[in-house]
Image (cartoon, coloured by chain):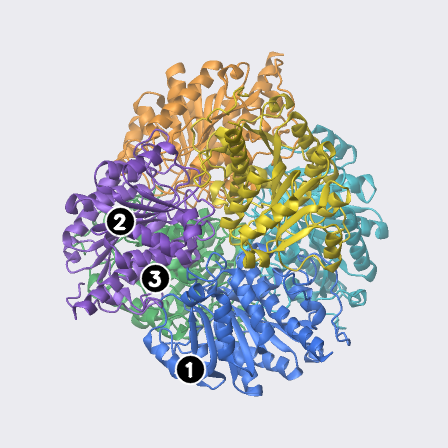
Chain colours: A green, B blue, C yellow, D cyan, E purple, F orange
Amino acid sequence: MIDPQRRWRPLPDKPDYAGFLSFGGAPLAQDPEHLAGVDVAIVGAPTDDLVSDRPGTRFAPRAIRAASCSPGPHLEAGVDAFAELRILDYGDAPVVPADPVRTHDAIRRIVGEVVDAGPLPVVLGGDHSITEPCIAAIAERRGAVGLIHFDTHTDTGREVFGVEHSHGTPMFRLVDAGHVAGNRYAQIGLRGYWPGPAEFEWQQSHGIASFFMHDVRDLGIREVVERALAHAGSGPVYLTVDVDVLDPAYAPGTGTPEPGGMTSVDLLWAVREIAARAELVGADVVEVLPQAVGSADITALVAERAVREVLTGLALRRSHARTASA
Amino acid sequence: MIDPQRRWRPLPDKPDYAGFLSFGGAPLAQDPEHLAGVDVAIVGAPTDDLVSDRPGTRFAPRAIRAASCSPGPHLEAGVDAFAELRILDYGDAPVVPADPVRTHDAIRRIVGEVVDAGPLPVVLGGDHSITEPCIAAIAERRGAVGLIHFDTHTDTGREVFGVEHSHGTPMFRLVDAGHVAGNRYAQIGLRGYWPGPAEFEWQQSHGIASFFMHDVRDLGIREVVERALAHAGSGPVYLTVDVDVLDPAYAPGTGTPEPGGMTSVDLLWAVREIAARAELVGADVVEVLPQAVGSADITALVAERAVREVLTGLALRRSHARTASA
Amino acid sequence: MIDPQRRWRPLPDKPDYAGFLSFGGAPLAQDPEHLAGVDVAIVGAPTDDLVSDRPGTRFAPRAIRAASCSPGPHLEAGVDAFAELRILDYGDAPVVPADPVRTHDAIRRIVGEVVDAGPLPVVLGGDHSITEPCIAAIAERRGAVGLIHFDTHTDTGREVFGVEHSHGTPMFRLVDAGHVAGNRYAQIGLRGYWPGPAEFEWQQSHGIASFFMHDVRDLGIREVVERALAHAGSGPVYLTVDVDVLDPAYAPGTGTPEPGGMTSVDLLWAVREIAARAELVGADVVEVLPQAVGSADITALVAERAVREVLTGLALRRSHARTASA
Amino acid sequence: MIDPQRRWRPLPDKPDYAGFLSFGGAPLAQDPEHLAGVDVAIVGAPTDDLVSDRPGTRFAPRAIRAASCSPGPHLEAGVDAFAELRILDYGDAPVVPADPVRTHDAIRRIVGEVVDAGPLPVVLGGDHSITEPCIAAIAERRGAVGLIHFDTHTDTGREVFGVEHSHGTPMFRLVDAGHVAGNRYAQIGLRGYWPGPAEFEWQQSHGIASFFMHDVRDLGIREVVERALAHAGSGPVYLTVDVDVLDPAYAPGTGTPEPGGMTSVDLLWAVREIAARAELVGADVVEVLPQAVGSADITALVAERAVREVLTGLALRRSHARTASA
Amino acid sequence: MIDPQRRWRPLPDKPDYAGFLSFGGAPLAQDPEHLAGVDVAIVGAPTDDLVSDRPGTRFAPRAIRAASCSPGPHLEAGVDAFAELRILDYGDAPVVPADPVRTHDAIRRIVGEVVDAGPLPVVLGGDHSITEPCIAAIAERRGAVGLIHFDTHTDTGREVFGVEHSHGTPMFRLVDAGHVAGNRYAQIGLRGYWPGPAEFEWQQSHGIASFFMHDVRDLGIREVVERALAHAGSGPVYLTVDVDVLDPAYAPGTGTPEPGGMTSVDLLWAVREIAARAELVGADVVEVLPQAVGSADITALVAERAVREVLTGLALRRSHARTASA
Amino acid sequence: MIDPQRRWRPLPDKPDYAGFLSFGGAPLAQDPEHLAGVDVAIVGAPTDDLVSDRPGTRFAPRAIRAASCSPGPHLEAGVDAFAELRILDYGDAPVVPADPVRTHDAIRRIVGEVVDAGPLPVVLGGDHSITEPCIAAIAERRGAVGLIHFDTHTDTGREVFGVEHSHGTPMFRLVDAGHVAGNRYAQIGLRGYWPGPAEFEWQQSHGIASFFMHDVRDLGIREVVERALAHAGSGPVYLTVDVDVLDPAYAPGTGTPEPGGMTSVDLLWAVREIAARAELVGADVVEVLPQAVGSADITALVAERAVREVLTGLALRRSHARTASA
């Protein structure tokens, strides 16, 4: 299944709705041996047991895959990630419904397996709690990471309704556990009515940089991304995208939508830019709550394209590196 | 708020979509003192943390209330439950998202509060796991109960995916804890592909009577209800209705729908018959997963009517008792 | 546009979704002169200003037309109504949104126009209030009519929320005005929680026959139709079908759905039987509240087929008459 | 129920989908005595009898409440309206379906009741005709008001299809009756194909300022809001927001959507700015036509957030006043 | 991947929404060598280029797989098809959008490949035209087959709108080509308005037996199935199920729905009975037009269960044969 | 039916949901003689046989008509196209489902018929393949045309999945056939992952100008439109708008949506500007895939408004010409 050559072989020419379901038509595999030589492994984390409002993101990994278009050159970036990178769909973590502890263990193990084998993991959530085991698996192997985090909400609660293991607390727990370096952690797109002063004081004490939606509105996305990249600095960076950072017009299918959000034009550019310039060690796209079939589900679709921008950014970086070394 | 007279006062004349949201326009209250003199208390249990497939029943209590029609005489039964009975909407149990243990404690407490004050509790789920705290609250006050259970699934798993606290296990746990008397427990509408021989052996060893959907098809609902009532016998009986006992045509909004199910004509008749003839001590309607607004959500609508049939059956029983004693 | 021959010419062969929108692809016309020689005129009454719950039936006439299939022989009845009868789509009454008085006047005028010119009017509602101007237009020309009425609700309220001009009162008003002969008026499919004893007493005093949904369940639709036909007796009969007589599984798109209703198998047969045997002077199908496009809207679809059964019944009657006279 | 202290007490900590349905979880009350000491009373006006196109806004008050998030500090404004203000959910006006005259009387009475007791009324429509009784109730107590009006349409028709009492005429009627001062009335977001020259001439003759959507596009929302505030001047101002001012991408659930509209980022900012700077005496958000449950209905959601921005603006004003007086 | 033992190994224990997408969680394979030793191969035919009305069945194979429940014993039949039979998901035929000729060739090749290797092919359509290449592939290897065909429509048109290669003509073409023996071909569920006398005369001349929906209504499904089995007689039989044979209440997601159809209780029983008693050489389920995700799509769900009944019938036959030979 | 005067007579005053279905309530006609004296003829092309992904645009012509609002003055442009121009709804081309060759011939013939009679054709697709017969019909009468093309995709594939007659190839075929002058052909809004270098090289070799979505983002729509108009130059120009040029937030109902697209504010302005300034000889709006009823379908709605902007631009041009000549 694995192409020994530097560039991944072209994928079979088939319509998106036919054939085995995988991300972008990438090869499917679930044995660790298939990870060898792979650049990026797509992993699903179909779980939503820890949400505080509307559930349903357990259906997202399949929906994001079903919204995939075929590989091809990114018309703005001019690079085809599937040609540049060896991309494998490594299936889903063996989640356990109604048992978030075992589910998170399973996610942590599968991401660790990927990292151990070499590929960069790109995870399809699931609710935002899955970022905790994803980053933990990376950080316990490579040390604390920087974090760039697109979201309406900071997700740095110490608890939500008294629950510590929640989709509103992963970033608190990751910083608290030393897996994320607060002074290399930037949030983009915050708005709405949560959290309160206590959480923001805690954030400040850890050096976390917050770019609110009104910063995006007032400074423009380019300036915000520059500042976020500067804050994240050099060293390994994880990128997490909660689709609710988008306005509900662009991403209606999410559990805690908040009007007044980003446009897809801004988000897609920003994700690619960050993937091309930061030293990415992992990424996820979370909180997609699909309803419709295939590309008719516009939230799964924009989430798929966000993953594509991660891949395109990585491909640009690879291509630039090759050019530079030539 | 409480009418001292034997018959509840007529409700205000208003369209169903206006005014405070309550079941059938019944008075809303959340203080235990308001339970005095009440015949039936409607309680919501908006939780779905323990499901194994599609979540969303946390939205059901509101949706069922929103699908309510105004009180009036049941055209077949000839009795108006809201005139005959003092019915109160006691609000929702104080559930905690992502913490099913605290949520179940809250449900158990609120149902116990109702039972202690006198009214019969009728609970709007929520997933089917909520039947466990509901019955437990009753049984610990009144002893083991008989159970009549409409469902596609037996819900008598010892575990589902290794999880013991699940919407697939409440009936096992209730029988196992002695809260439900197995030899007074009848299931109606079973079909599909779960559970397996081990569970059915366990069921048999406890004297549980199973009426499959093919029994309904072959014997007719009247004969099945006769047999179920005979099996439940005299003594306190709890009635639980999982809307997935209906064919998905009648109840598309549920988490684990199974084609080949009951019609609403049969279910509504059966529920009323049982409520009129058994010694009911509590009831619930569960596993409604709403999507649309008001009566446009046909699953919430049929669930609301199932609750109405419970109330109508109770009213018939009350009315017959009054006639008999006259 | 009008074929002078006894049988209507075959319609052009085109897919249902293309070409001018008309009922079954029938010719469109809106000038009275085009009514000459026509057997049946389809008229739309797109109004819902008088509903007490969910509005939206103003979109029904277009939706019912869009759900039309092409003409062809009815596979059970063996007759093609479009070949047997000259059927014209006479467009919509010139309704006035938010002005039900002018709207009803417009409906009464257009139905009168049709009746004056000869064709039998078949009206696509709109809410059920439109039956009042439809029957009034006929009765003021031909005298009081018998009525066969499929519905969950009797629609014989004197008022609804104090409003006399409502979709819950047309049958009261029609009987009260002498347009419908109470002793030739039969209702089929009643269920739910409305109206109350006062209305049923009034009904009884006028000799109205009520067949409840439990009668349909217990006697079967054939016996109920026999009794209804017998009650309607000889003389002119109007047929009105409120799609909420169907269970919400079969007709989810309606304003006041009531579970526990008829199946489409029963309703379609009954409508055809009545149209074939009664002396029909007009018919309507009302309370369709469409949401989806074309035949994807199953409520508009079953309403369209109910109209087809009216046409097929008329064609059978015509065909029998021709055979008998031969 | 009423907190005697200046700041309203924190609301109970519960998920948005549980518990009694009220705006933002605010206390529910319907007795005038409960209005004493309250700053803002939320009132529902669930009616849509006067629309000229798609109906359904009668379901909006419940849907907007169901889309509520819990109170908390506004992340841009830095103030929590529910902490700063005493906010009460005063339920719905006792509307009468199919009787717009009685319905408008009911709205006028309930808004008058609120104004008499002291709180500022914030009304959840309903169609836009409800602005007439809302403003009339205020103006007959406090004199003619200024008006800032977000909308696609001017709603200054003298009639629509010959109907004077319509959702297209309230602003004509209010100016005509002297309840709104034309020279203090500004419209924002106009576009599309209605009304015509006659209406605009009438508007000009009354000094009404119209900011079209192309003004928003060309000048930016900040400049437009400055000009509108300047036009409204000092003195009491009423704010009305028709959600169809938003592009259908942001507010698909409305009766007469018009592409080419505002973004939610612009609208939410503008509403808050106006509420913070004008001397607000009342506000409404209208023409929401909900379809889905809870926050899944993105139109109800953005309408809820528009109300929140009104509250946040009021809280800012209060907080500034307190600071200034300190 | 292939279990050498007679009984297939149990499938991994996972929730239906997680892991690689396959029918019932069966192993996925696409190399012919993996067909060895397999009893049943599931094949997708995602194409709808030849429909005459609403398209979209190209999404059905994925949707049917996504609606799969886990294996388990059929509660009525008492056998677990996945334990009894070696079932493989062989993926989709390599269809070509907008090129029905190449698509049908691809379907014919893949079915032929399955038949050559031994397994019985069960095909997930796709529109009904796919039955032509499926049966052709079988018949050219095993001779003319009998056919039992559930459908609203006969699909024996010589052309539809002048098009010979259509989803309305496969049965004409198969009989005409000698692949289906007309005198062993039975149709069940016919209704509606198509086709006309010419087609029925042709059918009669070939000995095709037609059971109309009114036969199902009048005789009952058991008698109809007996007669159909008797007509099909001994020898190889193919079973094709167009989901539009169901009433739109049960299968709203289909291209040409026709009210007045079968219930799922009847269809599922009938399919199992036929699979258990006829000498099945292949089967398909077609015309599913999915809209929603997973089991929320009730049409894909009932189609999946129809396939399950085929498998269960085959397992019963196998199990009986084993018992008989013991 | 045809008004001999220069200005078309005002249309009847009716709500949009009532009366015969036509574009903007324009007169309906299908006889060529009715084209005389007409300025613009609206033609439907309800076909989607050549799509490579989600089908359903065959329902678009009806849906676009149903989303029509009544005529009136464009509030920004100050002109009422229906007053300025004689606009006729010429119905649909007689398409043949599943036979794209005959369908395209039918479209070519009907557009030719319109062009021969004088009016400018404005075509409602259908998938984008319909642009080929539309332009061909014009070019064979008037010579090669310039083309301004809004789209995500270039549609200049030589084949898609090996199919030459596809909705991904019309622009290649039109340039290749000499019907479109490559050096007067400008594309606006390109993004995503298709096509590849070969197609762009071919485009360059023909002088085609491509404005990507990142050009719109970076230069602004006004500059892009200036450059596109300059590229198209003088001489006849055809305008084609694929609604997928819009972001899926604005046009979710389309077959191959691509996030990161245009806003409706930009598109509607651009279309009007082009229609006012270029020498338009025809236009189409394609790839609308409707789901909902009337204006509830926001994609059909924005498509309708795009057509309105074409008409408004033409009216402006006419009005300017009249002024200039006065």
Circles 3 and 2: CB distance less than 8 Å?
A: no
Do dots 3 and 1 share one subunit? Answer: no
Residue D97 vertical placement versus E162 (above, below): below
Find residue E178 and report its horizontal and vertical position in percent: 21, 39
Residues at marks 1 and 2, CA–CA distance in whole angstroms? 44 Å
Residue B207 is marked as 1
Helix, strand or loop under label 2: helix
Q: Is residue A40 visible?
A: no
Chain identity of mark 3: A
Helix, strand or loop under label 3: strand
Chain identity of mark 1: B
* Residue highlighted by disc 2: E232
Residue under the point 28% across and 48% down:
E231
Amino acid carrying label 2: it is: Ala
User: Of residues A177 and B213, which is closer to you in this image?
Assistant: B213
Quarter-wise, where is residue E143 in the image? top left
Do dots 3 and 2 share one subunit? Answer: no
> Counting other residues with Cα less than 10 Å from the Cα at mark 1, is it few (<14), some (14-19), or many (20 or more)?
some
Q: Is residue D185 visible?
A: yes
Amino acid carrying label 1: it is: Gly
Find residue D126 and report its horizontal and vertical position in percent: 68, 50
User: Of residues B191 and D211, which is closer to you in this image?
Assistant: B191
Amino acid carrying label 3: it is: Gly
> Counting other residues with Cα less than 10 Å from the Cα at mark 2, is it few (<14), some (14-19), or many (20 or more)?
many
Residue D206 horizontal side relative to residue C299, left or right? right
Residue E209 horizontal side relative to residue A188, left or right? left
Numbered disc in front, either 3 or 2? 2
* Residue highlighted by disc 3: A44
